[in-house]
């Protein structure tokens, strides 16, 4: 079909409109990138803090996507975590939220990259070796060889390695099962762990009693989660998984203006191959269809929908994830949703939307649980020393409780080898 003047004018007009939009978008991004964003309703956060006489019951550090930490002892996140561990002492828990080894988890012993992968995991484990509290590892898509068909073997190798080198640590759910599994962290505080990668993983993955899993099909874990939450309404509950349920970043379908013009930088940061116009097809695709690690992908979308359907029945549930390399907090439909995936990398996160707080910065979230029932969220970010930077955000997530119901017996995760728990 010949190109008519009308078609040519329409193409040029569309190209000009796209260019104007990209320029305006780029100018807007420059004003807020790498700066903390706080929603209007939380602007007075700095004037609110826990009362000085409140007694702490338990503390939790949520460290996501630490798989690219420096291995020479200079890593700012591990130094910051070390300071947190000393301060927190035994009445505390550190949760690694997956993507513990970049780029593809723990390869076989004779495979290229094995030694580098070991060093990245060893430096994490060395940081935790003298810690008196609980240590919990989850797996993410990179730990499953980025979701490839042989990913299950990568996961099993990493789990065995952690258990061997740090016998007191938990790797949950065990054997790559979907979960959920539970662990009582303190009086009136229950941790529930899900292996969210299980639902989006290609190839073999464990299911049923033969693999030590409690679920026999993909729907059962959500029914089990519903039952756990029903039976523990009297408790404060923290649910942990690798994949976020809300996100203003890449896996939530948010892209920078630069990524529209240089789309290959999404995969490799230095791939500055200009593809204007054509480059906008990648963000469009990942918004509508998605890669397996994106919320738009059918598997992820189904998992997210089922999980939210359960969680949103129970007020004040805290759900913590990594996956996107930034810090985000959402308070939505009576739930608290955290993205704490800035343990070794940072990436663009868009301000606004449903987010109460976002920051494109390395760091991790901490949760402080007090005896009176209050729960406070803290943002910990590194400096050149082991001391954290001045807080850029904190918020009380849960107000005081008038009474705390004594704990009944709850289903607990099996203790790891060598643990006295």
Image (spheres, grey):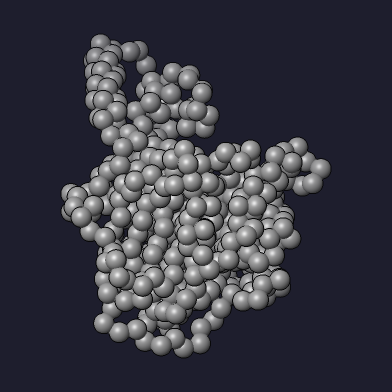
Question: Which quadrant would residue 238 be assigned to in this image?
Answer: bottom left
Q: Is residue 303 above or below residue 400?
A: above
Q: Is residue 183 visible?
A: yes
| In-image side of 260 versus 410 (left or right) | left
Question: Which quadrant would residue 233 be assigned to in this image?
Answer: bottom left
Foreground residue among 291 and 361: 361
| Number of marks | 0
Residue 153 point in image, percent of width and height: 71, 54
Q: Is residue 208 above or below residue 106?
A: below
| In-image side of 209 versus 411 (left or right) | right
Residue 271 point in image, percent of width and height: 51, 23
Q: Is residue 197 visible?
A: no
Q: Residue at x 44, y 80 (%)?
A: 187
Q: For the N terminus, which image quadrant?
A: top left
Foreground residue among 273 and 356: 356
Residue 217 point in image, percent of width and height: 57, 70
Q: Is residue 264 above or below residue 219?
A: above
Q: For the C terminus, which image quadrant?
A: bottom right
Foreground residue among 47 and 110: 47
Judged from this view, the residue extending furthest toward the right is: 110
Judged from this view, the residue extending furthest toward the front is: 53
Question: Which quadrant would residue 398 be assigned to in this image?
Answer: bottom left
Q: Residue at x 22, y 49 (%)?
A: 39
Q: Is residue 198 above or below residue 143?
A: below
Q: Residue at x 49, y 66 (%)?
A: 92
Residue 73 point in image, percent of width and height: 61, 41
Q: Residue at x 69, y 51 (%)?
A: 154
């Amino acid at each position: 079909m010949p190109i008519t003047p009308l078609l040519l004018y329409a193409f040029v007009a569309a190209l000009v409109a796209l260019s104007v939009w990209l320029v305006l978008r780029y100018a807007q991004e420059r004003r807020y990138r790498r700066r903390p964003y706080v929603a209007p309703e939380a602007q007075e956060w700095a004037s609110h803090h826990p009362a000085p006489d409140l007694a702490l019951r338990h503390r939790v550090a949520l460290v996501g996507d630490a798989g690219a930490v420096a291995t020479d002892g200079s890593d700012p996140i591990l130094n910051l975590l070390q300071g947190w561990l000393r301060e927190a002492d035994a009445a505390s828990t550190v949760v690694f939220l997956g993507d513990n080894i970049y780029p593809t988890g723990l390869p076989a012993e004779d495979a290229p990259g094995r030694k580098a992968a070991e060093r990245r995991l060893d430096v994490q484990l060395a940081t935790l070796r003298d810690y008196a509290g609980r240590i919990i590892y989850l797996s993410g898509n990179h730990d499953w060889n980025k979701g490839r068909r042989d990913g299950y073997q990568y996961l099993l190798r990493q789990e065995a390695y952690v258990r061997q080198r740090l016998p007191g640590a938990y790797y949950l759910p065990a054997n790559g099962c979907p979960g959920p599994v539970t662990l009582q962290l303190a009086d009136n505080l229950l941790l529930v762990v899900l292996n969210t990668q299980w639902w989006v993983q290609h190839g073999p993955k464990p299911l049923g009693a033969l693999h030590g899993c409690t679920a026999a099909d993909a729907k059962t874990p959500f029914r089990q989660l519903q039952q756990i939450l029903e039976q523990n309404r009297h408790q404060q509950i923290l649910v942990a998984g690798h994949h976020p349920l809300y996100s203003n970043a890449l896996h939530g379908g948010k892209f920078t203006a630069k990524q529209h013009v240089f789309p290959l930088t999404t995969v490799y940061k230095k791939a500055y191959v200009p593809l204007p116009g054509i480059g906008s097809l990648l963000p469009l695709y990942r918004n509508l269809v998605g890669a397996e690690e994106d919320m738009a992908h059918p598997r992820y979308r189904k998992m997210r929908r089922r999980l939210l359907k359960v969680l949103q029945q129970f007020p004040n549930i805290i759900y913590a994830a990594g996956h996107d390399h930034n810090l985000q907090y959402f308070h939505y439909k009576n739930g608290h949703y955290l993205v704490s995936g800035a343990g070794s990398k940072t990436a663009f996160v868009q301000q606004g939307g449903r987010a109460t707080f976002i920051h494109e910065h390395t760091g991790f979230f901490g949760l402080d649980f007090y005896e009176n029932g209050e729960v406070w969220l803290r943002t910990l970010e590194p400096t050149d020393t082991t001391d954290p930077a001045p807080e850029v955000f904190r918020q009380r997530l849960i107000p005081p409780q008038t009474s705390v119901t004594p704990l009944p017996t709850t289903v607990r995760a099996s203790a790891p080898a060598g643990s006295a728990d």
